[in-house]
Structure formats: structure tokens, C-alpha cells
Image (spheres, rainbow, N blue to C red):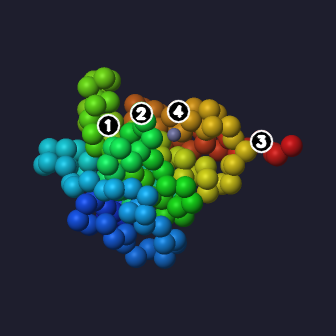
Amino acid sequence: MKTIAQRVHILHHGHEEPPQHGYHDYNPSWDYELTALPRAEQLDDLKKAIEEADADLLDALKFPGAVVFLAETRSLQANTHGVYADGTSQFPFIGLSMERLHDACEDTGNDFSVQIKATLAHELAHAWLEAQCSDDLSGDTEEQLVEEFAFTWVVHGQVDVSILESAIASPAP
Ligand SMILES: [Zn+2]
């Protein structure tokens, strides 16, 4: 039987202690101020996006679980909706700014849960690439690949890991 949404944990203000997972001891409260859970409607969209990412992406990318933490916008870099916490690739930790995601929807016309899904896929793809030790990718190349991976899932419903594998296929010089 398939259990949904139990492998991805949400951390927020008032609930900042990561789950016991045994892969690393990273705690987002070292680097970020966490926000409270959003109001009901946004929370439903967040949970829906996380359930879909759990169901579609975790096994494909071979992650045992993940943590989504809700970060204060001012603790993220300018113009970013989300962040992957470097070094957590065995059990990825992903920060989201609900505020920036909401603002992005006003610009793109996207559904809020779609916007969250795109960001989760983008950041999980960064984690996957880090796990493959693809340190020699340029930042721009990596951004293009993770965006293409996220777009292919969100828009076409396909989880195409070969997009990311193409980055590690070429042997090092
Ligand atoms: Zn990125």
C-alpha cells in the first residue's frame, strides 16, 4: 500500500525540529528564520504540491525523504522563491518563501500549488545533481537543467531524470 506525504516533512515557526532521519544533522534554524504555516487555502496548496512531489519525484530521484521548511523572505537571496540547503542531498532540505511564491503567481498567472511544485522540483533537482558530485557544472548550465526538469514535470507530467543525467554523462577532462 502506498503512503503519501509521510516522507516529506514541513518545518515552520513553532515546529522547527527536523525529523529523525539519520542522514545528516542539518537544522534550517541555523541559517533561516522560519515563518508560521500559511492560512488554510495556501496550506492546502502547499500540501497538495508536496504530496505530488512525494509521489512522483522522491523515488525517481532516489531520495528516502525530504524536509520543506518555510523561510522568512528576507532570509532568502533576492528574487528566489526557494533554496536547496547545500550538503543535505542524502535527505534534501528545501526552503520556500510563501510570500515570493505568491507574488510569482501574480506575475505568471500560475496556480499557487503549481508554482510550489515547480520550485520543489527545481530544488530537488539541485539536490540530485549535488548527490552525483556534479560540482564542475557551471551555475548557468545547472540552472537551465533543473528548470527544464521542473518544467517537464509540471507542464508535461513527465519525470525525466535523463535531463539531469545528461549533465553527468560527459566524462571529466
Ligand atoms: Zn536554482
Q: CA distance from mark 2 to mark 3?
A: 32 Å
Q: Horizontal placement of 66 versus 113: left or right?
A: right
Quadrant assignment for the C terminus: top right
Let me know if residue 92 appears in the view.
yes
In the picture of the structure, the residue carrying the numbered disc 2 is 79
Q: Label 4's element?
A: helix
Q: Which callout, 2 or 4, points at the residue further toward the start of the chain? A: 2
Mark 2 and 1 residues: CB-CB less than 8 Å, in contact?
yes
Residue type, label 1:
Arg
User: Which residue does the image show at 54% across and 39% down from the upper left?
Assistant: 146
In the picture of the structure, the residue carrying the numbered disc 4 is 148
Using the image as rendered, state which of residue 70 and residue 47 is in the foreground. 70
In the picture of the structure, the residue carrying the numbered disc 1 is 100
- For the image, the number of numbered tags is 4
Let me know if residue 5 appears in the view.
no
Q: CA distance from mark 2 to mark 4?
A: 19 Å
Mark 3: few, some, or many residues within 10 Å (few <14, many ≥20)? few
Q: CA distance from mark 1 to mark 4?
A: 21 Å
Q: Position of residue 71 (x, y in %)?
A: 34, 51
Numbered disc in front, either 2 or 3: 2
In the picture of the structure, the residue carrying the numbered disc 3 is 170
Q: Horizontal placement of 16 versus 60: left or right?
A: left
User: Which residue does the image show at 64% across and 34% down from the upper left?
Assistant: 141
Residue type, label 4:
Glu
User: Which residue does the image show at 55% across and 55% down from the upper left?
Assistant: 86
Q: Label 2's element?
A: loop
Q: CA distance from mark 1 to mark 3?
A: 36 Å
